[in-house]
Image (spheres, rainbow, N blue to C red):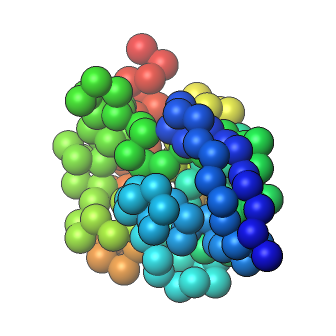
Amino acid sequence: MKRIISLTINGRKAEDAISDNTLLIDYLRDQKHLTGAKKGCDGGECGACTVLINGAARPACITLAATCDGAEIETIEGQARGGRLTALQRAFHENLGTQCGFCTPGMILSAEALLRHNPDPDDAEIRTALGSNLCRCTGYTKIIASVKVAAEEMRS
């Protein structure tokens, strides 16, 4: 069965017909051509598909698009404004918080959700916020440092 959903994606209104069983990751990638959220585990365990739904970090691979009707969705593509990277994006780049880049969009969006609610997190709070995001390339030290640098910049 199909339904019409209306939502806001990266600040833009969208209205589309979708099947009831369409996953948010598939809707974003296939219908909206927003490919920053990656298909990793397809089970909500790796965080590569993390997006913000009404400001909260959520795995798009286990979220039905129909449940997002009326919601505000943010993807990594909507973070930079006017061609300028956000503090988090810059910090990940400048502090080597990214290696291959596969997990980076999800990491950045999870960190963004944290910093919106807690602009001065300690290491334990950062680790908790990123606990659903897996990286196979790093030991997380540079990722945590990147979030701390961004938090400092955002507070200044």
Q: Which residue lies furthest to the top in this view?
A: 156
Looking at the picture, how far across and down is residue 11, in whole percent?
Answer: 53, 31
Which residue: 53% across, 85% down? Answer: 41
Give the number of callouts.
0
Above or below, 63 against 115 in this view is: below
Looking at the picture, how far across and down is residue 26, in whole percent?
Answer: 54, 71
Above or below, 117 against 3 in this view is: above
Q: Is residue 140 visible?
A: no
Q: Which of 112 and 121 is in front in this view?
A: 112
Which residue: 46% across, 32% down? Answer: 151
Above or below, 156 against 137 in this view is: above
Figure quadrant of residue 90: top left
Looking at the picture, how far across and down is residue 96, in whole percent?
Answer: 22, 54
For the C terminus, give its image quadrant: top left
Q: Can residue 78 be seen in this view?
A: yes
On the picture, is 79 further left or further right than 99? right
Looking at the picture, how far across and down is residue 132, in whole percent?
Answer: 61, 68
Which residue: 59% across, 35% down? Answer: 13
Above or below, 153 against 147 in this view is: above
On the picture, is 139 further left or further right than 121? left
For the N terminus, give its image quadrant: bottom right
Q: Which of 116 and 67 is in front in this view?
A: 67
Which residue: 50% across, 38% down? Answer: 10
